[in-house]
Image: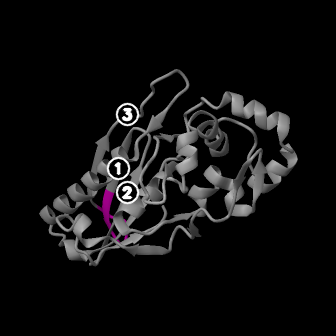
Amino acid sequence: MEYVIGVDIGTQSTKALLVDRQGAIVAQHASSYQPDTPKPLWAEQWPAVWFKAVTECIAACVQKGKQAGVAADSIKAVCVSSLYGGSGIPVDSEMRPLHPCLIWMDRRATDQVEWVRGNIDLEQLYAITGNGVDSYYGYTKMLWLRDHAPEVWAQTRYFLPPNAYVIYMLTGEIETAIIFALPTVGPAIVGSMAIGDVYVTATFMLVLSATLIVGNIIADMLLAMLDPRVRQYGGA
């Protein structure tokens, strides 16, 4: 019989299930944490917290699966979903995180919201992104980073959704699914749009269907937990 591990990165915990092809649960595990809230309205997370939780959950599911008679080489896939990552994780050209991710519940970008309302064609913004103007949306959080952390902005190559960063760490592939990319960098997916002197272009990363295979998990990354033939999926 073949099995799959499903992982969901949440705001306060990461959960994982080991299931068979009919969806029967064989094993499960959760790892908890809290977002950092250094100031009122702020909510952020370093991606290392998420990656540590993901690997702990996968390892625990594999171990519990072995105890239930499931061999590691019968686990054929790992699927990673995640919370809405707000700004996304800013990383440089070497894929090093430059700043905590400003997650969905972060509301610091109030000035940026007012700037967008006063300077951008809101009908065009909605037509391109399908989103309104609110500090919930990733583009306002990106503008906050541009305005308040210019050294981060200058070095940023990608803004990665949380699961895209974890998938990169597992596989070495930089890809995401549109359901994760669109709320964060909507203009990058549908077209190109100028927000002041910020140009969000369609060159951020490859966008795939959430059901397509991204690549193989790097063997030396998870060798102690998973058979290297296990494959990594890109979405929920």
Instruction: Tell me residue 58's x, y (percent).
Output: 27, 58
**Residue 86 locus on image (x, y percent):** 57, 44
Magenta run includes residue 73 = no
Near mark 2 (Cα within 10 A), the count class, few <14, some 14-19 or many ≥20, is many
Mark earlier in primary sequence (1, 2): 2
Question: Label 1 crowding class (10 Å Cα cut-off): few <14, some 14-19, many 20+?
Answer: many
Q: Is residue 209 visible?
A: yes
The image quadrant that residue 76 belongs to is: bottom left
* Tag 1–tag 2 contact (CB < 8 Å): yes
Query: In the image shown, does 186 or 195 lie closer to the viewer?
Result: 195
Residue placed under numbered mark 1 in the picture:
15
SS state under label 2: strand
Q: Amino acid at mark 2?
A: Val
Q: Which mark is residue 7?
A: 2
Q: CA distance from mark 1 to mark 2?
A: 6 Å
The amino acid marked with disc number 1 is Lys
Q: Earlier in the sequence, mark 2 or mark 3?
A: 2
Find disc 3 in the rendering and name its residue. 34
* Residue type, numbered disc 3: Gln
Instruction: Give above or below for 117 relative to 18.
Output: above
SS at circle 3: loop
Q: Which mark is residue 151?
A: none
Left/right placement of residue 69 relative to residue 207 reads left
Extreme residue toward the left, this view: 67
Determine whether, in the image, residue 210 is placed left or right of residue 25.
right
User: Which residue is drawn at the image coordinates 50% and 71% (left, top)?
Assistant: 211
